[in-house]
């Protein structure tokens, strides 16, 4: 299994528009972050979690020339703005690209990109829309995944587990069911938007993440969806040995 962090940034990206760097050192390339997205290659099948505003650039920067399925976590702009790119991407493929989204997320997608639905759920657009369960197991491209939701603002954000690896983004409090679903995880890639800052803004900080780590004891933790308050060198130096900050292009082979 191969994982590439396509984007490690929060909703506004790093630096933010108008070249705002906030707490970030400008001379560190690891502080330049696309919106959060993940690529996974499992048994030759290619999966992406979320397609934000830099989706096209993220694929091209990492020379990813094919995707079989895309999982959407929730309907915020930083996770769906690149979904229309899939119409173009699928035109070069012999079969449609599966896009998995919960009913709640699909409603947001319909509102944002009604032209991609056009009445039928299938598609002149080359997209095969698939309904992601709120919790449980689903199979895409012959690979079995588990999913569950975490509360995030007015939304529920879908999280994903494959064997002993999990990806959790855009969360503030981990519900007990989430801890249950994460038991036995060895690799946890999880949002730590606020870093050392504690703020009730629908996102997590290092203290929240540490509570999850203590509860499930993963071997390796990678923090992602990082805001401009999370300087790579400053924060990385303060983390336990098995916890790392993500950066764009970070590759994990398992
Ligand atoms: Zn987000
Ligand atoms: Zn969000």
Image (tube, grey):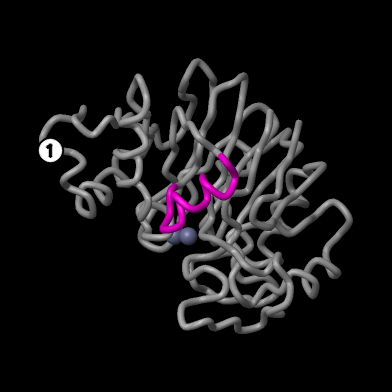
The local crowd at label 1, few if under 14, some if 14 to 19, many if 20 or more residues have their Cα within 10 Å, is few
Residue that lies at the very extreme toward the left in this rendered image = 119
Q: Position of residue 165 (x, y in %)?
A: 67, 35
Q: Is residue 221 magenta?
A: no
- Asked whether 92 or 214 is in front, the reply is 92
Q: Quadrant of residue 196?
A: bottom right
Residue that lies at the very extreme toward the top in this rendered image = 142
> Compared with residue 42, is residue 217 higher up or lower down, i.e. above or below?
below
- Asked whether 162 or 251 is in front, the reply is 251
Q: Position of residue 108 (x, y in %)?
A: 27, 51
Q: Position of residue 126 (x, y in %)?
A: 27, 30
212 left or right, relative to 10: right
Question: The N terminus is located in which quarter?
Answer: top right
Q: Residue at x 21, y 47 (%)?
A: 110
> Compared with residue 92, is residue 199 higher up or lower down, i.e. above or below?
below
Q: Which residues are magenta?
A: 51-63
Numbered marks: total: 1
């Amino acid at each position: 299994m191969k994982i590439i962090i396509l984007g490690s940034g929060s909703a506004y990206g790093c630096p933010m528009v108008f070249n705002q760097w906030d707490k970030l050192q400008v001379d560190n390339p690891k502080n330049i972050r696309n919106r959060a997205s993940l690529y996974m290659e499992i048994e030759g099948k290619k999966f992406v979690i979320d397609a934000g505003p830099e989706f096209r650039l993220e694929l091209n920067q990492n020379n990813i020339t094919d995707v079989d399925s895309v999982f959407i976590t929730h309907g915020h702009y930083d996770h769906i703005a690149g979904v229309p790119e899939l119409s173009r991407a699928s035109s070069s493929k012999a079969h449609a690209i599966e896009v998995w989204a919960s009913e709640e997320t699909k409603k947001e997608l319909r509102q944002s990109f009604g032209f991609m639905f056009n009445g039928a759920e299938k598609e002149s657009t080359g997209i095969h829309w698939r309904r992601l369960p709120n919790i449980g197991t689903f199979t895409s491209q012959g690979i079995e995944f588990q999913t569950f939701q975490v509360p995030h603002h007015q939304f529920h954000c879908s999280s994903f587990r494959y064997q002993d690896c999990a990806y959790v983004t855009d969360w503030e409090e981990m519900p007990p069911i989430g801890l249950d679903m994460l038991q036995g995880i060895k690799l946890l890639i999880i949002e730590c938007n606020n870093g050392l800052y504690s703020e009730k803004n629908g996102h997590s900080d290092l203290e929240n993440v540490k509570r999850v780590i203590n509860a499930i004891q993963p071997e390796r933790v990678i923090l992602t969806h990082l805001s401009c308050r999370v300087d790579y060198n400053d924060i990385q130096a303060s983390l336990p040995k098995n916890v790392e900050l993500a950066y764009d292009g970070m590759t994990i082979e398992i």
